[in-house]
Image (cartoon, coloured by chain):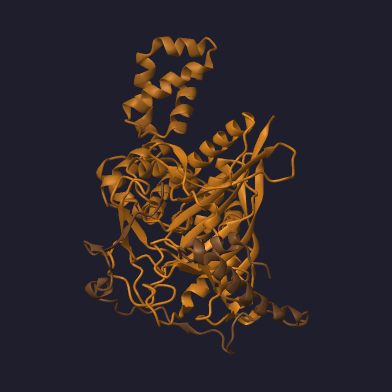
Amino acid sequence: MKYEAVIGLEIHCELKTKTKIFCGCATGFGADQNTHVCPVCLGLPGVLPTINKRVVEFAIKAGLATNCEINKYSKFDRKNYYYPDLPKNWQTSQYDLPIAIHGWVDIDTEDGRKRIRLTRIHMEEDAGKLVHSGTNIKNSLTSNVDYNRTGVPLLEIVSEPDLRSAEEARTYMEKIKTIMQYIDVSNCRMEEGNLRADVNVSLRPVGSETLGTRTEMKNINSFKGLEDAINYEVERQREVLEDGGHIVQETRTWDPERGMTLSMRSKENAHDYRYMPEPDLPPIVTTDEQIAKYRDELPELPDARRERLEKDYGLSDYDAGIITGSRASAEYFDAVVAAGADAKLAANWMMGDLAKNLNAENLTIEQSPVDAKRLGAMIGLISKGTISSKIAKKVFKEMWTCPDDPEKIVKDKGLVQITDTSAIEGIVDEVIAANEKAVNDYKGGNKKAIGALVGQVMKKTRGKANPQMVNKLLAQKLNG
Amino acid sequence: MKVTKDDLDNVAVLSRLTIPSEEAPQYIEQLDKFLTYVDNLAQVDTEEVRPTTYALPIQNVFRDDVVKPSLDREAALSNAPLKEDGYFKVPKVLED
């Protein structure tokens, strides 16, 4: 039997507020253990939490940016469970009245654009961090707990089970990351755990509408981990089903080192969250005016920006998609164009030499030694005919290590394109005299032989001759 | 209401309580009485009543996103039964 995978993601996105969701403790990453804690986030008796206004603002903006409906009456609830990373023994979260519902985002797949529906976005507090004494949670006799992260604001973005492959899941998560970066509500640093996914995976026979039994994998914090975990789990479930077995609904953990998922919780019956309305936090009531104000404050979003680049500059859908793939990259592009560069050349350079160099040195575009202004100026030199595209590659390489303006580099290194006909003519004559065979081939009807001659001229001028001009001169002389 | 032994066991697990088996009948009887009493509410017609989500007539109580001093770590850890290197120390998390 052929099976298809049915995948849904719950993405946890840490918000970039200065303080925690219910208290004034700082949220900064990397502080000494248990130094960002207070009676509220430690869950000491008798304390009163108060909602951080920015969290609500960020949550509503995230909802609007993902085409959600905003619940004008929203509230917090207690989700009860016993785990040492949660000092109160409940997580303050949202249950039946989350801040945003029924949204969608579009992703690019092999079969074109696909709409992924969002069930909801809700606000909640993050949990603390456990440091295990053994190599993993199961073989540790004790664990140490750091509550700095406890109470850091999170959005949980829940998708419908609309994803069908590991690749789609990755693309979807990348899209969510891009949107959160654009609207500037999260740093989205995967390595700092700003973005983590719980993944639900089930299989069903192709053509069936009924959902199979699913398993959940928690806390996946890299795109590669996400793809690997899903691929592993789909394969595992397929084998179980093909052997006539059945899938047990359970939580499994992804072990990136061993490349496999492992069963995690034995007592599934203890999984009863007993949600109840949070009595310490009054409801959040949002007016249409406030929602309109937040909508006005949103920047141009990735899809709109992509369309603009296609429409205004004639970029291909693919190129525009890559360039608008992060806010930083989209802004870099706009700055290159603002510096006077041709838009298509700007796109080519960004996706070519710039991307190649950044990847090789593992840099982000914000860290690029060649900023948008200098790249724009260099592309301007190509358009003006001062340098050829080939020489431009040399100039770019120089610019990578030298902070000078491209004009200065071109001048200092003597890279200005030779457009002086008489200078090129002399070299063309030399080359014709020295390459009798190619000349005869050409004259004998093999027009392609001119390529070798052009190459010789370019070599002698160290790439500085204008290739079109060389071609023209050679043709004139050989045909003349 | 009819509370069963299974109900009691489940509540005990969720509450992290150990209930000696000889005391179980007593708790079952008490829980049963309690739930029967609460069940009286079911006689009230609530068709037109919206669920109460919050008991007081207040909403939108917010604070600004401004950092306040945290607790001194020694103070934070002072009530911890076990601690180590500035961490709260807890026994084995997952059972085998």
Nearest the viewer among A139 and B59 is A139
Nearest the viewer among A375 and A122 is A122
Q: Residue A394: x and y, percent?
A: 33, 38
- Relative side of A314 to A256, left or right: right
Nearest the viewer among A106 and B90 is B90
Q: Residue at x 73, y 45 (%)?
A: A210
Furthest-bottom residue in this view: B57
Q: Residue A369: x and y, percent?
A: 31, 51
| Chain depicted in brown | B
Q: Residue at x 69, y 77 (%)?
A: B39
> Which hue is chain A drawn in?
orange
Q: How many numbered marks are there?
A: 0
Please determine whether, in this image, residue A449 is positioned above or below residue A108: above
Answer yes or no: is residue A66 visible.
Answer: no
Nearest the viewer among A249 and A323 is A249
- Dividing the image into 4 quarters, which one contains the N terminus of chain A? top right
Q: Residue at x 47, y 68 (%)?
A: A90
Please determine whether, in this image, residue A98 is positioned above or below residue A159: below
